Protein backbone atom coordinates (compact mmCIF):
# COMPACT_ATOMS: atom_id res chain seq x y z
CA UNK A 1 0.00 0.00 0.00
CA UNK A 2 2.66 2.34 1.08
CA UNK A 3 4.75 1.33 -1.90
CA UNK A 4 1.84 1.93 -4.30
CA UNK A 5 1.35 5.44 -2.91
CA UNK A 6 5.02 6.13 -3.39
CA UNK A 7 4.87 4.89 -6.99
CA UNK A 8 1.85 7.10 -7.73
CA UNK A 9 3.53 10.09 -6.10
CA UNK A 10 6.70 9.44 -8.10
CA UNK A 11 4.66 9.26 -11.30
CA UNK A 12 3.07 12.61 -10.44
CA UNK A 13 6.51 14.13 -9.91
CA UNK A 14 7.74 12.74 -13.20
CA UNK A 15 4.77 14.15 -15.12
CA UNK A 16 5.21 17.56 -13.44
CA UNK A 17 8.86 17.56 -14.52
CA UNK A 18 7.91 16.69 -18.10
CA UNK A 19 5.43 19.27 -19.33
CA UNK A 20 3.96 18.78 -22.79
CA UNK A 21 6.69 19.06 -25.40
CA UNK A 22 7.07 22.77 -26.32
CA UNK A 23 6.18 23.69 -29.89
CA UNK A 24 9.20 23.80 -32.22
CA UNK A 25 10.46 27.39 -32.51
CA UNK A 26 8.76 28.74 -35.62
CA UNK A 27 11.95 30.39 -36.84
CA UNK A 28 14.04 27.26 -36.39
CA UNK A 29 11.42 25.36 -38.37
CA UNK A 30 11.49 28.03 -41.08
CA UNK A 31 15.24 27.59 -41.36
CA UNK A 32 14.89 23.81 -41.56
CA UNK A 33 12.24 24.20 -44.29
CA UNK A 34 14.44 26.60 -46.26
CA UNK A 35 17.43 24.28 -45.93
CA UNK A 36 15.28 21.36 -47.14
CA UNK A 37 14.33 23.14 -50.38
CA UNK A 38 16.41 21.68 -53.21
CA UNK A 39 16.81 25.04 -54.99
CA UNK A 40 18.33 26.58 -51.83
CA UNK A 41 20.87 23.83 -51.21
CA UNK A 42 24.07 25.35 -49.83
CA UNK A 43 22.47 28.80 -49.58
CA UNK A 44 21.10 28.53 -46.03
CA UNK A 45 23.70 29.28 -43.37
CA UNK A 46 23.07 27.94 -39.86
CA UNK A 47 24.61 29.13 -36.57
CA UNK A 48 27.88 27.44 -35.77
CA UNK A 49 28.97 27.05 -39.39
CA UNK A 50 31.95 28.97 -40.70
CA UNK A 51 29.93 30.44 -43.58
CA UNK A 52 27.50 31.95 -41.04
CA UNK A 53 30.26 33.30 -38.81
CA UNK A 54 32.16 34.81 -41.73
CA UNK A 55 29.04 36.51 -43.08
CA UNK A 56 28.19 37.92 -39.65
CA UNK A 57 31.65 39.48 -39.62
CA UNK A 58 30.86 41.31 -42.83
CA UNK A 59 28.56 43.92 -41.32
CA UNK A 60 29.75 47.51 -41.25
CA UNK A 61 28.53 48.05 -37.69
CA UNK A 62 28.93 45.63 -34.79
CA UNK A 63 25.55 46.88 -33.54
CA UNK A 64 23.81 45.68 -36.69
CA UNK A 65 25.35 42.20 -36.78
CA UNK A 66 22.50 40.40 -34.97
CA UNK A 67 22.83 36.61 -35.08
CA UNK A 68 19.71 35.20 -36.80
CA UNK A 69 18.24 31.69 -36.65
CA UNK A 70 19.70 31.36 -40.14
CA UNK A 71 20.71 33.41 -43.16
CA UNK A 72 19.59 32.64 -46.68
CA UNK A 73 21.54 33.95 -49.66
CA UNK A 74 19.49 33.60 -52.85
CA UNK A 75 21.18 33.87 -56.25
CA UNK A 76 18.12 34.31 -58.48
CA UNK A 77 14.73 36.03 -58.45
CA UNK A 78 13.06 32.58 -58.53
CA UNK A 79 14.88 31.64 -55.34
CA UNK A 80 13.74 34.89 -53.68
CA UNK A 81 10.21 33.96 -54.72
CA UNK A 82 10.58 30.52 -53.10
CA UNK A 83 11.90 32.15 -49.92
CA UNK A 84 9.10 34.73 -49.83
CA UNK A 85 6.40 32.08 -50.28
CA UNK A 86 7.82 30.00 -47.45
CA UNK A 87 8.15 32.98 -45.11
CA UNK A 88 4.57 33.97 -45.96
CA UNK A 89 3.13 30.50 -45.43
CA UNK A 90 5.00 29.69 -42.21
CA UNK A 91 4.87 33.22 -40.79
CA UNK A 92 8.63 33.40 -40.25
CA UNK A 93 10.18 36.52 -38.83
CA UNK A 94 12.75 37.97 -41.18
CA UNK A 95 15.21 40.74 -41.88
CA UNK A 96 16.66 42.03 -45.15
CA UNK A 97 20.25 42.74 -45.91
CA UNK A 98 21.80 44.10 -49.10
CA UNK A 99 25.21 45.75 -48.61
CA UNK A 100 24.97 45.53 -44.81
CA UNK A 101 26.02 49.14 -44.30
CA UNK A 102 23.18 50.44 -42.14
CA UNK A 103 24.47 50.84 -38.62
CA UNK A 104 21.78 50.32 -36.02
CA UNK A 105 20.71 47.06 -34.37
CA UNK A 106 17.71 45.82 -36.32
CA UNK A 107 18.49 47.70 -39.52
CA UNK A 108 19.39 44.70 -41.62
CA UNK A 109 19.31 41.50 -39.54
CA UNK A 110 17.16 39.77 -36.92
CA UNK A 111 18.02 38.23 -33.59
CA UNK A 112 15.37 35.54 -34.09
CA UNK A 113 14.31 34.70 -37.61
CA UNK A 114 15.70 34.53 -41.13
CA UNK A 115 18.03 37.15 -42.55
CA UNK A 116 17.38 37.29 -46.28
CA UNK A 117 20.79 38.38 -47.54
CA UNK A 118 20.98 39.67 -51.13
CA UNK A 119 24.78 39.68 -51.20
CA UNK A 120 24.95 36.96 -53.86
CA UNK A 121 22.68 38.93 -56.19
CA UNK A 122 25.37 41.40 -57.05
CA UNK A 123 25.65 41.76 -60.81
CA UNK A 124 25.16 44.75 -63.09
CA UNK A 125 24.13 44.17 -66.69
CA UNK A 126 24.48 46.73 -69.45
CA UNK A 127 24.50 46.80 -73.23
CA UNK A 128 26.38 49.64 -74.93
CA UNK A 129 24.03 52.42 -76.03
CA UNK A 130 21.21 51.46 -73.64
CA UNK A 131 19.54 54.17 -71.52
CA UNK A 132 19.41 51.97 -68.44
CA UNK A 133 21.60 49.54 -66.53
CA UNK A 134 20.17 46.60 -64.59
CA UNK A 135 21.66 46.50 -61.10
CA UNK A 136 20.90 43.68 -58.65
CA UNK A 137 19.87 44.76 -55.14
CA UNK A 138 22.74 43.03 -53.34
CA UNK A 139 25.53 44.72 -55.26
CA UNK A 140 27.75 47.38 -53.83
CA UNK A 141 28.00 50.61 -55.80
CA UNK A 142 31.72 50.02 -56.27
CA UNK A 143 31.00 46.82 -58.17
CA UNK A 144 28.30 48.52 -60.30
CA UNK A 145 30.70 51.35 -61.25
CA UNK A 146 33.41 48.84 -62.14
CA UNK A 147 31.08 46.96 -64.51
CA UNK A 148 29.84 50.14 -66.20
CA UNK A 149 33.24 51.79 -66.49
CA UNK A 150 34.34 50.24 -69.81
CA UNK A 151 31.16 51.62 -71.39
CA UNK A 152 31.99 55.19 -70.33
CA UNK A 153 28.79 55.52 -68.29
CA UNK A 154 27.77 55.32 -64.65
CA UNK A 155 24.68 55.38 -62.41
CA UNK A 156 23.60 57.74 -59.61
CA UNK A 157 24.79 55.56 -56.73
CA UNK A 158 26.68 55.97 -53.46
CA UNK A 159 29.80 58.04 -52.89
CA UNK A 160 31.55 55.14 -51.15
CA UNK A 161 32.26 51.83 -52.96
CA UNK A 162 31.18 49.72 -49.99
CA UNK A 163 27.59 51.00 -49.81
CA UNK A 164 24.91 48.56 -50.93
CA UNK A 165 22.26 49.15 -53.58
CA UNK A 166 19.24 47.95 -51.56
CA UNK A 167 19.46 50.27 -48.56
CA UNK A 168 20.59 53.31 -50.55
CA UNK A 169 17.98 53.16 -53.31
CA UNK A 170 14.99 52.40 -51.05
CA UNK A 171 15.71 55.40 -48.80
CA UNK A 172 16.51 57.98 -51.50
CA UNK A 173 20.20 57.92 -52.39
CA UNK A 174 22.37 61.03 -52.34
CA UNK A 175 24.93 60.78 -55.15
CA UNK A 176 27.39 62.97 -57.01
CA UNK A 177 24.59 63.33 -59.60
CA UNK A 178 21.78 64.49 -57.31
CA UNK A 179 21.82 68.13 -58.39
CA UNK A 180 21.35 67.06 -62.02
CA UNK A 181 19.21 63.97 -61.63
CA UNK A 182 17.52 64.01 -58.23
CA UNK A 183 18.10 61.21 -55.73
CA UNK A 184 19.34 57.79 -56.84
CA UNK A 185 15.76 56.48 -56.52
CA UNK A 186 14.58 59.15 -58.96
CA UNK A 187 16.74 57.58 -61.67
CA UNK A 188 15.08 54.16 -61.26
CA UNK A 189 12.98 53.37 -64.35
CA UNK A 190 11.88 49.98 -63.05
CA UNK A 191 12.02 47.93 -59.86
CA UNK A 192 11.74 44.16 -59.99
CA UNK A 193 10.07 43.21 -56.71
CA UNK A 194 9.12 39.87 -55.16
CA UNK A 195 5.92 40.41 -53.19
CA UNK A 196 5.14 38.81 -49.83
CA UNK A 197 3.28 35.91 -51.49
CA UNK A 198 6.18 35.19 -53.85
CA UNK A 199 4.71 36.84 -56.95
CA UNK A 200 7.29 38.73 -59.03
CA UNK A 201 6.21 42.16 -60.29
CA UNK A 202 7.75 45.07 -62.14
CA UNK A 203 7.04 48.60 -60.99
CA UNK A 204 7.56 51.45 -63.43
CA UNK A 205 5.71 54.42 -64.92
CA UNK A 206 3.39 52.15 -66.94
CA UNK A 207 3.04 49.08 -64.77
CA UNK A 208 2.24 49.24 -61.03
CA UNK A 209 3.01 52.96 -61.11
CA UNK A 210 1.76 53.40 -57.53
CA UNK A 211 4.29 50.85 -56.28
CA UNK A 212 7.04 52.48 -58.39
CA UNK A 213 6.42 55.83 -56.80
CA UNK A 214 6.00 54.54 -53.24
CA UNK A 215 9.16 52.46 -53.50
CA UNK A 216 11.15 55.66 -54.16
CA UNK A 217 11.72 56.47 -50.49
CA UNK A 218 9.32 53.89 -49.03
CA UNK A 219 12.17 51.80 -47.57
CA UNK A 220 11.78 48.01 -47.28
CA UNK A 221 8.01 48.14 -46.77
CA UNK A 222 6.54 46.54 -49.89
CA UNK A 223 8.54 43.53 -50.96
CA UNK A 224 11.96 42.06 -51.71
CA UNK A 225 13.62 44.19 -54.38
CA UNK A 226 15.72 41.99 -56.62
CA UNK A 227 16.75 44.40 -59.40
CA UNK A 228 16.71 48.08 -60.22
CA UNK A 229 16.87 49.35 -63.79
CA UNK A 230 18.53 52.75 -63.55
CA UNK A 231 19.13 55.59 -65.96
CA UNK A 232 22.77 55.77 -66.93
CA UNK A 233 24.48 59.10 -66.44
CA UNK A 234 26.08 60.66 -69.52
CA UNK A 235 29.69 60.20 -68.49
CA UNK A 236 31.72 58.12 -66.06
CA UNK A 237 34.05 61.09 -65.54
CA UNK A 238 34.12 62.96 -62.26
CA UNK A 239 36.17 65.87 -60.97
CA UNK A 240 36.22 65.60 -57.20
CA UNK A 241 38.25 65.70 -54.03
CA UNK A 242 38.68 67.05 -50.54
CA UNK A 243 39.65 70.62 -49.81
CA UNK A 244 40.83 71.06 -46.23
CA UNK A 245 40.76 74.41 -44.48
CA UNK A 246 42.05 75.95 -41.28
CA UNK A 247 40.07 76.77 -38.13
CA UNK A 248 40.74 80.48 -38.74
CA UNK A 249 38.92 80.21 -42.05
CA UNK A 250 35.82 78.48 -40.71
CA UNK A 251 33.49 81.46 -40.98
CA UNK A 252 34.72 82.42 -44.43
CA UNK A 253 34.43 78.85 -45.66
CA UNK A 254 30.93 78.36 -44.29
CA UNK A 255 29.83 81.63 -45.91
CA UNK A 256 31.26 80.46 -49.24
CA UNK A 257 29.35 77.17 -48.81
CA UNK A 258 26.03 78.94 -48.15
CA UNK A 259 26.61 81.15 -51.19
CA UNK A 260 27.39 78.07 -53.32
CA UNK A 261 24.24 76.29 -52.14
CA UNK A 262 22.10 79.34 -52.92
CA UNK A 263 23.34 79.12 -56.50
CA UNK A 264 23.24 75.38 -57.15
CA UNK A 265 20.57 75.80 -59.81
CA UNK A 266 23.05 77.68 -62.01
CA UNK A 267 25.50 74.76 -62.36
CA UNK A 268 23.71 71.45 -62.03
CA UNK A 269 26.81 69.26 -62.28
CA UNK A 270 28.61 70.92 -59.37
CA UNK A 271 28.06 69.94 -55.75
CA UNK A 272 29.70 70.35 -52.39
CA UNK A 273 29.31 69.13 -48.86
CA UNK A 274 31.09 70.01 -45.64
CA UNK A 275 32.78 67.45 -43.43
CA UNK A 276 33.96 68.01 -39.87
CA UNK A 277 35.79 65.19 -38.08
CA UNK A 278 36.68 65.07 -34.40
CA UNK A 279 37.98 62.09 -32.46
CA UNK A 280 39.75 60.99 -29.28
CA UNK A 281 42.66 63.26 -30.20
CA UNK A 282 42.43 67.03 -30.19
CA UNK A 283 42.86 67.72 -33.89
CA UNK A 284 39.66 68.63 -35.71
CA UNK A 285 39.61 68.18 -39.48
CA UNK A 286 37.38 70.38 -41.59
CA UNK A 287 37.04 69.76 -45.28
CA UNK A 288 34.70 70.16 -48.18
CA UNK A 289 33.99 67.49 -50.74
CA UNK A 290 33.83 69.32 -54.02
CA UNK A 291 32.65 67.62 -57.23
CA UNK A 292 31.58 68.10 -60.80
CA UNK A 293 29.76 65.13 -62.31
CA UNK A 294 30.58 66.09 -65.91
CA UNK A 295 34.29 65.97 -65.07
CA UNK A 296 34.73 69.73 -65.59
CA UNK A 297 37.80 71.02 -63.74
CA UNK A 298 37.35 74.06 -61.48
CA UNK A 299 34.01 75.27 -62.80
CA UNK A 300 33.28 78.95 -61.97
CA UNK A 301 30.62 77.89 -59.45
CA UNK A 302 33.50 77.14 -57.04
CA UNK A 303 35.34 80.45 -57.50
CA UNK A 304 34.44 81.76 -54.07
CA UNK A 305 34.91 78.42 -52.26
CA UNK A 306 38.32 77.86 -53.82
CA UNK A 307 39.48 81.40 -53.08
CA UNK A 308 39.52 80.58 -49.36
CA UNK A 309 43.06 79.54 -48.36
CA UNK A 310 43.30 75.74 -48.07
CA UNK A 311 45.59 73.43 -46.10
CA UNK A 312 45.14 70.32 -48.22
CA UNK A 313 43.60 69.57 -51.54
CA UNK A 314 43.08 66.28 -53.40
CA UNK A 315 41.04 67.36 -56.41
CA UNK A 316 41.47 65.30 -59.56
CA UNK A 317 39.57 64.10 -62.59
CA UNK A 318 39.14 60.43 -63.37
CA UNK A 319 36.41 57.89 -63.87
CA UNK A 320 34.04 57.49 -60.93
CA UNK A 321 35.23 53.90 -60.72
CA UNK A 322 38.69 55.16 -59.73
CA UNK A 323 37.69 58.19 -57.65
CA UNK A 324 35.04 56.60 -55.42
CA UNK A 325 37.36 53.91 -53.96
CA UNK A 326 39.93 56.63 -53.21
CA UNK A 327 37.19 58.59 -51.44
CA UNK A 328 36.01 55.56 -49.53
CA UNK A 329 39.40 54.99 -47.98
CA UNK A 330 39.47 52.34 -45.29
CA UNK A 331 35.98 51.73 -43.92
CA UNK A 332 36.76 49.18 -41.21
CA UNK A 333 34.08 46.61 -40.43
CA UNK A 334 32.85 45.71 -36.98
CA UNK A 335 33.19 48.99 -35.10
CA UNK A 336 30.27 50.18 -32.96
CA UNK A 337 28.69 52.61 -35.40
CA UNK A 338 25.69 54.87 -34.98
CA UNK A 339 24.40 57.19 -37.68
CA UNK A 340 21.75 59.84 -37.03
CA UNK A 341 20.42 62.74 -39.01
CA UNK A 342 18.49 66.02 -38.90
CA UNK A 343 17.49 68.64 -41.47
CA UNK A 344 17.76 72.41 -41.04
CA UNK A 345 17.36 75.51 -43.14
CA UNK A 346 20.65 76.40 -44.85
CA UNK A 347 21.81 79.18 -42.54
CA UNK A 348 25.29 80.28 -41.46
CA UNK A 349 24.22 80.46 -37.79
CA UNK A 350 23.44 76.73 -37.78
CA UNK A 351 26.82 75.86 -39.28
CA UNK A 352 28.85 77.91 -36.82
CA UNK A 353 26.77 76.67 -33.89
CA UNK A 354 27.33 73.05 -34.93
CA UNK A 355 31.09 73.61 -35.22
CA UNK A 356 31.38 75.09 -31.73
CA UNK A 357 28.98 72.58 -30.14
CA UNK A 358 30.98 69.68 -31.61
CA UNK A 359 34.15 70.93 -29.93
CA UNK A 360 32.35 71.11 -26.57
CA UNK A 361 30.73 67.69 -27.02
CA UNK A 362 33.93 65.86 -28.03
CA UNK A 363 35.84 67.43 -25.11
CA UNK A 364 33.17 65.91 -22.84
CA UNK A 365 33.47 62.53 -24.60
CA UNK A 366 37.25 62.45 -24.18
CA UNK A 367 36.91 63.26 -20.49
CA UNK A 368 34.14 60.70 -19.90
CA UNK A 369 35.81 57.83 -21.80
CA UNK A 370 39.53 58.61 -21.67
CA UNK A 371 40.66 55.21 -23.00
CA UNK A 372 38.30 55.15 -25.96
CA UNK A 373 39.09 55.37 -29.64
CA UNK A 374 36.22 57.10 -31.39
CA UNK A 375 35.30 59.36 -34.26
CA UNK A 376 32.47 61.82 -34.73
CA UNK A 377 32.06 62.63 -38.40
CA UNK A 378 29.65 65.40 -39.34
CA UNK A 379 28.50 65.84 -42.91
CA UNK A 380 26.49 68.87 -43.96
CA UNK A 381 24.85 68.23 -47.29
CA UNK A 382 22.62 70.59 -49.19
CA UNK A 383 19.13 69.69 -50.36
CA UNK A 384 17.98 72.31 -52.85
CA UNK A 385 14.87 73.19 -54.80
CA UNK A 386 16.63 72.24 -58.02
CA UNK A 387 17.33 68.74 -56.66
CA UNK A 388 13.71 68.29 -55.64
CA UNK A 389 12.47 69.58 -59.01
CA UNK A 390 14.50 66.84 -60.72
CA UNK A 391 12.77 64.29 -58.50
CA UNK A 392 9.38 65.60 -59.57
CA UNK A 393 10.36 65.68 -63.23
CA UNK A 394 11.36 62.01 -63.00
CA UNK A 395 7.93 60.93 -61.77
CA UNK A 396 8.13 61.91 -58.12
CA UNK A 397 8.96 60.05 -54.93
CA UNK A 398 7.44 59.85 -51.45
CA UNK A 399 10.18 61.69 -49.52
CA UNK A 400 8.07 64.82 -49.10
CA UNK A 401 11.00 67.19 -49.62
CA UNK A 402 8.90 69.74 -51.54
CA UNK A 403 7.75 71.17 -48.21
CA UNK A 404 11.27 71.08 -46.75
CA UNK A 405 12.74 73.29 -49.50
CA UNK A 406 9.66 75.46 -50.06
CA UNK A 407 11.35 78.52 -48.47
CA UNK A 408 14.84 77.86 -49.80
CA UNK A 409 17.64 75.31 -49.55
CA UNK A 410 18.06 73.03 -46.57
CA UNK A 411 21.06 71.26 -45.09
CA UNK A 412 21.09 67.64 -44.04
CA UNK A 413 23.02 67.21 -40.79
CA UNK A 414 24.55 63.73 -40.53
CA UNK A 415 26.31 62.60 -37.36
CA UNK A 416 28.27 59.37 -37.89
CA UNK A 417 29.74 58.05 -34.66
CA UNK A 418 32.12 55.10 -34.49
CA UNK A 419 33.43 53.74 -31.18
CA UNK A 420 35.91 50.94 -30.48
CA UNK A 421 34.03 48.98 -27.78
CA UNK A 422 30.49 48.46 -26.53
CA UNK A 423 31.47 49.82 -23.10
CA UNK A 424 32.83 53.05 -24.58
CA UNK A 425 29.78 53.31 -26.81
CA UNK A 426 27.60 53.22 -23.67
CA UNK A 427 29.36 56.41 -22.55
CA UNK A 428 29.82 58.22 -25.86
CA UNK A 429 26.51 57.52 -27.63
CA UNK A 430 24.38 59.35 -25.00
CA UNK A 431 26.74 62.33 -25.26
CA UNK A 432 26.36 62.28 -29.05
CA UNK A 433 22.59 62.33 -28.71
CA UNK A 434 22.91 65.18 -26.21
CA UNK A 435 24.97 67.07 -28.82
CA UNK A 436 22.33 66.42 -31.48
CA UNK A 437 19.59 67.63 -29.14
CA UNK A 438 21.56 70.77 -28.33
CA UNK A 439 21.73 71.59 -32.05
CA UNK A 440 18.04 70.75 -32.45
CA UNK A 441 17.13 73.09 -29.60
CA UNK A 442 19.15 75.90 -31.18
CA UNK A 443 17.56 75.29 -34.61
CA UNK A 444 14.11 75.20 -33.00
CA UNK A 445 14.76 78.50 -31.23
CA UNK A 446 15.44 80.15 -34.59
CA UNK A 447 12.59 78.36 -36.36
CA UNK A 448 15.12 76.67 -38.68
CA UNK A 449 14.47 72.98 -37.87
CA UNK A 450 12.83 71.33 -40.88
CA UNK A 451 11.90 68.25 -38.84
CA UNK A 452 12.71 65.75 -41.60
CA UNK A 453 14.91 62.64 -41.35
CA UNK A 454 16.73 60.89 -44.19
CA UNK A 455 16.22 57.11 -43.81
CA UNK A 456 19.69 55.92 -44.99
CA UNK A 457 21.32 58.01 -42.24
CA UNK A 458 18.65 57.67 -39.54
CA UNK A 459 19.05 56.00 -36.17
CA UNK A 460 16.62 53.17 -35.39
CA UNK A 461 14.22 55.34 -33.38
CA UNK A 462 14.09 58.31 -35.79
CA UNK A 463 11.01 57.04 -37.65
CA UNK A 464 11.85 58.68 -41.00
CA UNK A 465 8.60 57.83 -42.80
CA UNK A 466 6.55 59.78 -40.26
CA UNK A 467 8.14 62.97 -41.66
CA UNK A 468 7.15 62.44 -45.31
CA UNK A 469 3.80 64.26 -45.04
CA UNK A 470 0.21 62.96 -44.94
CA UNK A 471 -0.26 62.70 -48.71
CA UNK A 472 2.81 60.54 -49.19
CA UNK A 473 1.92 58.42 -46.17
CA UNK A 474 -1.54 57.83 -47.62
CA UNK A 475 0.04 56.51 -50.84
CA UNK A 476 2.52 54.36 -48.90
CA UNK A 477 -0.33 52.86 -46.83
CA UNK A 478 -2.51 52.12 -49.83
CA UNK A 479 0.39 50.51 -51.73
CA UNK A 480 1.22 48.36 -48.71
CA UNK A 481 -2.40 47.23 -48.43
CA UNK A 482 -2.60 46.42 -52.14
CA UNK A 483 0.71 44.55 -52.59
CA UNK A 484 1.11 43.08 -49.10
CA UNK A 485 -2.49 42.56 -47.95
CA UNK A 486 -1.46 40.30 -45.04
CA UNK A 487 0.99 42.95 -43.80
CA UNK A 488 4.03 40.62 -43.74
CA UNK A 489 6.42 43.55 -44.22
CA UNK A 490 4.89 45.31 -41.19
CA UNK A 491 4.71 42.39 -38.78
CA UNK A 492 6.98 39.50 -39.88
CA UNK A 493 9.71 41.83 -41.14
CA UNK A 494 11.78 42.80 -38.13
CA UNK A 495 14.46 44.92 -39.82
CA UNK A 496 14.41 48.51 -41.01
CA UNK A 497 11.81 51.24 -40.86
CA UNK A 498 8.07 50.56 -40.85
CA UNK A 499 5.04 52.53 -41.97
CA UNK A 500 3.86 54.60 -39.00
CA UNK A 501 0.42 53.48 -37.78
C1 LIG B 1 30.75 54.52 -45.70
C2 LIG B 1 29.34 54.88 -46.04
C3 LIG B 1 29.09 55.80 -47.05
C4 LIG B 1 27.78 56.18 -47.37
N1 LIG B 1 27.57 57.06 -48.41
C5 LIG B 1 26.30 57.40 -48.74
C6 LIG B 1 26.05 58.30 -49.83
O1 LIG B 1 26.94 58.78 -50.52
N2 LIG B 1 24.76 58.65 -50.07
C7 LIG B 1 23.71 58.13 -49.35
O2 LIG B 1 22.57 58.47 -49.65
N3 LIG B 1 23.92 57.26 -48.35
C8 LIG B 1 25.19 56.89 -48.02
N4 LIG B 1 25.39 56.03 -46.98
C9 LIG B 1 24.23 55.48 -46.25
C10 LIG B 1 23.73 54.23 -46.96
O3 LIG B 1 22.96 54.61 -48.08
C11 LIG B 1 22.86 53.39 -46.01
O4 LIG B 1 23.65 52.91 -44.95
C12 LIG B 1 22.21 52.22 -46.75
O5 LIG B 1 21.21 51.64 -45.94
C13 LIG B 1 23.23 51.19 -47.13
O6 LIG B 1 22.69 50.29 -48.04
P1 LIG B 1 22.91 48.74 -47.83
O7 LIG B 1 22.36 48.04 -49.02
O8 LIG B 1 24.32 48.50 -47.46
O9 LIG B 1 21.88 48.53 -46.62
P2 LIG B 1 21.52 47.32 -45.59
O10 LIG B 1 22.12 47.72 -44.32
O11 LIG B 1 21.95 46.01 -46.19
O12 LIG B 1 19.98 47.43 -45.60
C14 LIG B 1 19.31 48.52 -45.02
C15 LIG B 1 17.82 48.47 -45.27
O13 LIG B 1 17.58 48.55 -46.66
C16 LIG B 1 16.42 47.82 -47.01
N5 LIG B 1 16.77 46.81 -48.02
C17 LIG B 1 17.97 46.22 -48.21
N6 LIG B 1 17.90 45.37 -49.22
C18 LIG B 1 16.64 45.40 -49.67
C19 LIG B 1 15.94 44.71 -50.71
N7 LIG B 1 16.55 43.82 -51.49
N8 LIG B 1 14.64 44.98 -50.88
C20 LIG B 1 14.01 45.88 -50.11
N9 LIG B 1 14.61 46.55 -49.13
C21 LIG B 1 15.91 46.32 -48.91
C22 LIG B 1 15.94 47.13 -45.81
O14 LIG B 1 14.85 47.86 -45.29
C23 LIG B 1 17.09 47.19 -44.85
O15 LIG B 1 16.58 47.27 -43.57
C24 LIG B 1 26.69 55.62 -46.65
C25 LIG B 1 26.93 54.70 -45.64
C26 LIG B 1 28.23 54.32 -45.33
C27 LIG B 1 28.46 53.33 -44.23
C1 LIG C 1 28.67 37.96 -55.69
O1 LIG C 1 27.83 36.82 -55.79
C2 LIG C 1 28.49 35.59 -56.05
C3 LIG C 1 27.43 34.51 -56.16
O2 LIG C 1 26.39 34.91 -57.01
C4 LIG C 1 29.46 35.28 -54.93
O3 LIG C 1 30.19 34.11 -55.22
C5 LIG C 1 30.42 36.44 -54.74
O4 LIG C 1 31.23 36.21 -53.61
C6 LIG C 1 29.64 37.74 -54.54
N1 LIG C 1 30.56 38.87 -54.46
C7 LIG C 1 30.63 39.64 -53.40
C8 LIG C 1 31.60 40.77 -53.49
O5 LIG C 1 29.94 39.48 -52.42
C1 LIG D 1 45.05 75.25 -52.34
O1 LIG D 1 46.11 76.09 -51.97
C2 LIG D 1 47.25 76.05 -52.86
C3 LIG D 1 48.33 76.89 -52.24
O2 LIG D 1 47.86 78.16 -51.93
C4 LIG D 1 46.81 76.54 -54.24
O3 LIG D 1 47.90 76.47 -55.15
C5 LIG D 1 45.68 75.64 -54.73
O4 LIG D 1 45.20 76.12 -55.98
C6 LIG D 1 44.55 75.63 -53.73
N1 LIG D 1 43.58 74.65 -54.16
C7 LIG D 1 42.39 74.95 -54.57
C8 LIG D 1 41.50 73.79 -54.96
O5 LIG D 1 41.97 76.08 -54.63
C1 LIG E 1 -0.03 37.81 -54.64
O1 LIG E 1 -0.32 39.10 -54.16
C2 LIG E 1 -0.68 40.03 -55.15
C3 LIG E 1 -0.87 41.37 -54.45
O2 LIG E 1 -1.80 41.27 -53.42
C4 LIG E 1 -1.92 39.56 -55.88
O3 LIG E 1 -2.23 40.47 -56.91
C5 LIG E 1 -1.67 38.20 -56.48
O4 LIG E 1 -2.85 37.70 -57.07
C6 LIG E 1 -1.21 37.23 -55.40
N1 LIG E 1 -0.82 35.98 -56.04
C7 LIG E 1 -1.22 34.80 -55.60
C8 LIG E 1 -0.72 33.63 -56.36
O5 LIG E 1 -1.92 34.68 -54.61
Image (cartoon, grey):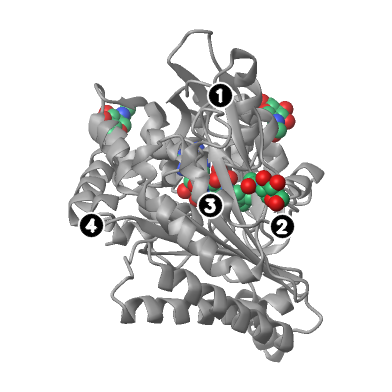
Q: Quadrant of the N terminus?
A: bottom right
Q: Which of the two discs, 1 and 4, labels the residue nearer the N terminus?
A: 1
State whether residue 183 is above or below residue 153. below
The residue tagged 1 is 76
**Between marks 3 and 2, how big is the CA–CA gap?**
13 Å
Q: Which residue is mark 2?
A: 311
Examine the image and state in which quarter residue 468 appears.
Answer: bottom left
The local crowd at label 1, few if under 14, some if 14 to 19, many if 20 or more residues have their Cα within 10 Å, is some
The residues bearing labels 3 and 1 have C-alpha atoms spaced at a distance of 48 Å
Instruction: Say above or below: 497 vs 97.
Output: below
Q: Position of residue 22 (x, y in %)?
A: 56, 63
In terms of secondary structure, where does tag 1 sit?
loop
- The answer as to whether callout 2 falls within 8 Å of ligand 3 is yes
Residue closer to the observer: 459 or 387: 387
Tell me how far mark 4 sits from mark 2, CA to CA. Answer: 43 Å
Closer to the camera in the image, 104 or 291: 291
CB within 8 Å, label 3 to label 2 = no
The quarter of the picture where the C terminus appears is bottom left
Residue 105 screen position, x and y as percent: 58, 62
Residue toward you, 446 or 371: 446
Amino acid sequence: MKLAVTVVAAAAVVSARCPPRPPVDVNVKCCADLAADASLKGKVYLPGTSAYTTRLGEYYSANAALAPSCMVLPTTTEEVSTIAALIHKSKCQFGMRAGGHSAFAGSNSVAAGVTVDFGYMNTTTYTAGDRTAAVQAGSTWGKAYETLDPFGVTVAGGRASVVGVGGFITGGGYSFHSNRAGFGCDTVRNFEIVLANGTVVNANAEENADLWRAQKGGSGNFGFITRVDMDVQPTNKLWAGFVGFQPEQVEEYYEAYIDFVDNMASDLASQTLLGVIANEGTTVTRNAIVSNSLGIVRPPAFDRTLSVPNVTETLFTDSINIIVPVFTGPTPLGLFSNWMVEMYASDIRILTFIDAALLRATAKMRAAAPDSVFQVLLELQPVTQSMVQHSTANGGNVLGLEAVVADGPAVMFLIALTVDTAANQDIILPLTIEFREEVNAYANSLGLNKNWKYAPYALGDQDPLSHYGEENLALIRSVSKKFDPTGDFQTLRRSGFKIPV
